[in-house]
Image (cartoon, coloured by chain):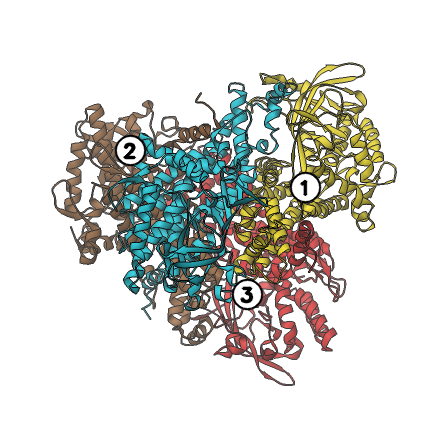
Chain colours: A red, B yellow, C cyan, D brown
Amino acid sequence: MISSREYLERLKAMKPNVYMGGELVSRDHPLIMPGIRVIALTYDLAQDPQYQELLTATSHLNGKRINRFTHIHQSPEDLLKKQEMTRVLTRKTGFCIQRCMGVDAMNALSVVTWEMDESLGTEYHQRFLNYLEYWQERDITGCCAQTDAKGHRKLRPHQQPDPDAYVRVVKKDAKGIVVRGAKRHITVGSYAEEIIVLPTRVMTQQEKEWAVAFAVPGDAPGLYLVNRASAPRPRRHLKAPLASFGSSDTLTIFEDVFVPWERVFMCGETEFAGDLALLFALFHRHSYTGCKPAVTDVIMGFTALAAEYHGIEKAQHIQMKLADLIGVAELVYGAGMAAAVKAKRSASGTWIPDPVFCNVGRRHAGEHIYHEHHILSEVAGGIPATLPYEDDFFSPELGELVNKYTRHRPDIPAEHQHRCFRCIGDLAVSAFGGVWQYAGVHGGGSPIMETIALLKNYDLEEKKRVAKELAGIPEE
Amino acid sequence: MISSREYLERLKAMKPNVYMGGELVSRDHPLIMPGIRVIALTYDLAQDPQYQELLTATSHLNGKRINRFTHIHQSPEDLLKKQEMTRVLTRKTGFCIQRCMGVDAMNALSVVTWEMDESLGTEYHQRFLNYLEYWQERDITGCCAQTDAKGHRKLRPHQQPDPDAYVRVVKKDAKGIVVRGAKRHITVGSYAEEIIVLPTRVMTQQEKEWAVAFAVPGDAPGLYLVNRASAPRPRRHLKAPLASFGSSDTLTIFEDVFVPWERVFMCGETEFAGDLALLFALFHRHSYTGCKPAVTDVIMGFTALAAEYHGIEKAQHIQMKLADLIGVAELVYGAGMAAAVKAKRSASGTWIPDPVFCNVGRRHAGEHIYHEHHILSEVAGGIPATLPYEDDFFSPELGELVNKYTRHRPDIPAEHQHRCFRCIGDLAVSAFGGVWQYAGVHGGGSPIMETIALLKNYDLEEKKRVAKELAGIPEE
Amino acid sequence: MISSREYLERLKAMKPNVYMGGELVSRDHPLIMPGIRVIALTYDLAQDPQYQELLTATSHLNGKRINRFTHIHQSPEDLLKKQEMTRVLTRKTGFCIQRCMGVDAMNALSVVTWEMDESLGTEYHQRFLNYLEYWQERDITGCCAQTDAKGHRKLRPHQQPDPDAYVRVVKKDAKGIVVRGAKRHITVGSYAEEIIVLPTRVMTQQEKEWAVAFAVPGDAPGLYLVNRASAPRPRRHLKAPLASFGSSDTLTIFEDVFVPWERVFMCGETEFAGDLALLFALFHRHSYTGCKPAVTDVIMGFTALAAEYHGIEKAQHIQMKLADLIGVAELVYGAGMAAAVKAKRSASGTWIPDPVFCNVGRRHAGEHIYHEHHILSEVAGGIPATLPYEDDFFSPELGELVNKYTRHRPDIPAEHQHRCFRCIGDLAVSAFGGVWQYAGVHGGGSPIMETIALLKNYDLEEKKRVAKELAGIPEE
Amino acid sequence: MISSREYLERLKAMKPNVYMGGELVSRDHPLIMPGIRVIALTYDLAQDPQYQELLTATSHLNGKRINRFTHIHQSPEDLLKKQEMTRVLTRKTGFCIQRCMGVDAMNALSVVTWEMDESLGTEYHQRFLNYLEYWQERDITGCCAQTDAKGHRKLRPHQQPDPDAYVRVVKKDAKGIVVRGAKRHITVGSYAEEIIVLPTRVMTQQEKEWAVAFAVPGDAPGLYLVNRASAPRPRRHLKAPLASFGSSDTLTIFEDVFVPWERVFMCGETEFAGDLALLFALFHRHSYTGCKPAVTDVIMGFTALAAEYHGIEKAQHIQMKLADLIGVAELVYGAGMAAAVKAKRSASGTWIPDPVFCNVGRRHAGEHIYHEHHILSEVAGGIPATLPYEDDFFSPELGELVNKYTRHRPDIPAEHQHRCFRCIGDLAVSAFGGVWQYAGVHGGGSPIMETIALLKNYDLEEKKRVAKELAGIPEE
């Protein structure tokens, strides 16, 4: 396991291929650093004895102690711990811990490479295990690049006017493959050491060139990362953890990138593309049952704090709203726990969480994120939207008056009240907050995708049989 | 373990004290039998090898095989099994399995009698164990009488103009106590062999006479059961399981009923009254995380069947509605599972489910029962509300026309379509259905009670600390 | 205008063709009388000076004073008055006033007969006016039979295996037409003097025989009314208006019924079938913007009364729930008013309410009826579901105790409290209540139909233009 | 009526007293200009013949043609027109038209000054009329400063530790009064020529010094405007109306500001303070029934456009979501129309919209703004949150690839697709968007305030009487 300093040094050593606003920028650009700080936390806390139990695991490859973000789940307990780790860490940053992307992709690969080999006689699983050992050994931060550009939504990959609308193999030889296309919305892309590319959907037999999975270094030749960063407005006076963290997403362009065979994990096995796509989504939705309750914890914490600072925390309508937030957090978390309890061991040995519980959990979260923001807004009042700029509070001319007139409770320091509502502004009245509303709906799958996954995995016929039995209707 | 026949014989042997419509009636009155049939199922299936694992347990008193409805939970697995058993059985009747009332009361007593003895040096726990052994041995069906008449809602028990508004001890001597008052909404009351009486709320020191818990036979002298029965309209032609089951609730009047000391489990220990009240509610809310998903299973099954019989089961808006129902069922069930996983062992050895997860689960169920009926209504269409009477379908003069004009899909027998929509009418357009809407909101605690319980058990201060840490606000 | 006595006498003089439970019954059958009492109210109050302004109008045919339920709307004010009349009357019965069915059908015919004549040179409008004069003169109670049996939902009328799935013309000669088929869910069917039959959907050119509209006397030869009645359980001691009213729906079977030409208002004009279907629906949805607020008034009144009788009317969560109910009532009512303000005069002179406002209003009502019942249930508590039978309150043996233990506030007569919760039971825990939940969703069109109507009438392209203009996207 | 150029010149001529980030800034600061552009529109379009009918009115003072934003409503039609004008203009800017603040304050003053004079013999109304003439003559843009700093929320003004927590009169002499305190959340504050100050709540007899209403020029000595501006990120390449507009809110500090008597409209008349506060709120909520539907129009337009650009506009779940948005827009608009239809003429001649309809409309809007954003987010997908920066689309090195991979439909220009999703980002993933979510909840009154206003104005007793009559309960 490495330190966050080592991670940062490795990032700086990478070849520049990150672009923002039309310019090539360094990976430690001030707008990217907030996201890097989030990842840094996953290294530092893993070395903190208080969190070791939760943030580390024992590699099933070699028995070494590894960061849990590089671990393949060996039991339902592993799934419970990963869920808990995700909640604990997400609360420390105020939103997304980001590093689950890579580990979720690795777990999905662990299962499907085994299944391809079993069914088709390929050799992907051993290749994957070699790569995994490298990954665990170096304590890699990776990301998962799944969502393709997609082009026309009503057309399948092989029907697109532009065949690059989905990432595809354009050349194949003895050494490896060459890929072209782009992946969108790739969180961590610009500060990932490794980018794992997975298919985004079921592929048909005509779509061999699009059924591809592989890993590339984040600075591979031909790889362009068009980055969009988001973070709260930087503070000058009132430094705060929340305001120091952020995230980035990249439009990840593969302009004929070469991938050697030892990093290729699927190439043409169309019948497994959908499995791999869905399995990553499943592991990632399970991650959401850990992080979304933490997002709610943070919203709930600021809601309760705002209520206290307004002096209205005992009002019944506030209590009702807090209970609503608790309901969202714990129903989602409970669903994730149930998914672990009902997890199944795959043939590869990796434990897979129950898809019904993962999907009802993630779907519930996605359907309530705006409701949660609504509650926070109702309780906070208009203050976060109209709070004067930070510097106005420190202005020699008007600072005293600004503090005088924005303070509610005389028994609580003005600065504390200021800090509380400025953070709510960061969370809810900012581009950064908007990103996390959208991520709340779409990250790890939109509610409509969970609905589809749910209906696919749920035995509705069995429910009809219950009805028929009660109604005295014989099975037809 | 006994057979349902033995249960019925024991009921018939009881002294008549059940009243309906101003008249003393026999316990096997045709309006009461539908409820009795539900309980009968819990005896018969326990003897069915297919269900034995789920419906029976090993007594921790003597190692004997007992009905799980008489078992004290010895592990998280016991809680998971009880939850699963409740779902499985509830699906067989279409609504409430009813017998959990007694076992939930017994589990609550197992914990609090131990705690009273520990704290006050009383001897309630051994008394309770003796009673439990009798109960397990005879495979008793009991009910729990908790909700008092309550009088004026704003006044405490000792402030009521009528002191009988809450059940109380009016006399105490060497042999036992005499109690007076009434308990409302007591499901199973008229076909319970034993009635367990628990306090309904926290009691203050001035309320010693109201801090009382005990058990009486269902036909104890001075006990009057004013019964209200509900069941679907009986069928003449199209017998169906759903239409054969029902339930009863009693206004349970204690008109100076004597209780010998060996059946008294609390008498004046005001500081434990609230614990006992809340602990029964907690066990019962955990039961709801088993039964409410089953209620949703049944609603979902009929919704899906109606959609199929209309030929619209593939429509996207139908699919969305089914996904909503799945979400309600499995979020509540998942919360119950999480409550078992996070259960704590009490000093008495009884395992207590986690209150936060129980309450978010039960609360979610209570807040969605009308929503579920709304969905069923939307999909079923107006048919259940205007379906001609059963006999019109069998009328020599018009039966053929009635069938011709109420049938939708020609490839499905008219009778099946008729059965489906008549059952939906039984569930949703009937006094019986109305009772189960109200029970869906209030049974085992109204949403407002779960909200209160939730806020009481949830560590909101800890969430505020998360917010403060993120905002850089030191602990005051 | 006639008295209710005259209406009753006319009903009794009709040939028996109403069936219930397989038997031919008299129109004044005790189960049908509750519905008749509702209609009677529309006659009696029209003669009450207090209501005359609202319940009567001036015929545009001959200037005579007529019951507003027979009036063709001559202005936006007429639409506002009809809406208000509907709310006022519905509050007097507790649910549906029923008689709007006929007048809504007549208004739709007034418009479309004119348009057919204009476009096709037919003579339907004069025929309609003659019929209207008869109807106004005799102060007729009619119903509208629109919803067909429909058979397989995915097939059009002419594709059905059974051509009778939609009412159709099976014979045509110089004197008139012969029709066959059935109409479902026909409220008022068994106590309507006249049944107006309209098409239920758009018809294509292949569907001439199904494009038919006409009127028949309620006891026409070949017409069979299979009736389903619903009403609260009759009272023995505590007579109350709510418990005296009810309704009936018929499966209305046309077994080769002859209709003379002077009563035929469409016969083969397929291009106008959809207009007529939708226009009746539109007038009827406008009626709903009057009656649904009244249904909410009643639910709100009982919710507020239950809260008062519990002594909790000042609690904030109760206040919030009442505000929710007010919101439902007045948003729907306001939408109906806006529909009148934005009404358009048709070429026939009849004023047509705005379809967008009618549909958003009706849709909002339909989406909230279960929510309203949920609120009533939450506030009422479990009492309506478990209240002992009426006779138990009057039992010499136990009546006193039953009253003692079901009474909450000592300062309010026990009988008043009993009456309140018994009525809530009538409204919400009864087959009657279930019928009105279903009617709340489906009466006058299901929410999905309003959604479709809304999207059809709403200019979404114009909204896209607003977006494009703001975004600087030129019109393509 | 003046031109926007004249307005701008007058602004520039004002004495600088606007502060941002601790610095004194000019009124035409680039961050403030977006808000000024919104107001400019209200001048320019009033001179556009197409909008003249809607945007101008005839002064009741002197019969001159005036901007409707300076008009006192003389009829229900005026209220309908003001509502329509607000919707039309708000659609042109994409959010808030802002100028209603002033006119709503003026209408409230027109009523209450008359009532004070009538009741107390004061001379406020004539003073107000003089001021109004000046206002209409100069075509003033004003704002209304109502919300005080408030201090401790549980204390009344006179109980506050800091008496300045509510704006108050600190000195009074023959020439006028001197006021101190601050008003928060004052939209338009920094580009208003006149600031109208009204009390924010009911005042008791001990609160004479806080019962004060007056008008001051925006640059009065002692007045400090601490401004917070918000607007979409400025564009370099893809200029668009939406991105050119914005708004500002000020913390408006009165540091001993002198107000001559002719500009004082209330001074110590505590019994009228609440009336004035509520009446402004009422007029302003009526404004919301015009602007919130327009906000929904814009959200709906972009939702429909995004769906079209994704090629999914026919999907049923999209259609349902659009219908939901239509429902929100038109129910709120319909409520506002009903409020005009049911408006009452005050003794001053000003027409006052119906409070029940205004409040149900505004409340419905406030409860659905996050729901609307949720829908937009669901349909737009993650794109607005991760869209590369504008310059990346125009980068010589990568611009072509960025366009290639962010384009969906090949038949629609890439730039149009880019423009659409960038605007959605402006609306929903930006600090500006966050401000408008908060304004959607709190602007013109939070939902809880509408709930309170609703319950205050609604005759619940009458609803209880309906229930009692139906239940046969005599009036007590």
Per the image, the residue denoted by label 3 is C161
Which residue is at a point 37% across and 63% down the rendered structure image? C269
Left or right: A326 in relation to D372: right
Q: Chain of mark 1?
A: B
Indicate the amino acid at tag 3: Pro
Q: Is residue B410 left or right of residue D32?
A: right
Q: Quadrant where the N terminus of chain A lies? A: bottom right
Q: Quadrant of residue D257?
A: top left
Q: CA distance from mark 2 to mark 3?
A: 70 Å
**Labels 3 and 1 within one chain:** no
Vertical placement of residue B114 versus A287, above or below: above
**Residue at mark 1:** B96
Q: Using the rendered image, report if marks 2 and 3 lie on a common chain.
A: no
Mark 2 vs mark 1: in front: 1
Quadrant of the frame with the C terminus of chain A: bottom right
Which labelled disc corresponds to residue D276? 2
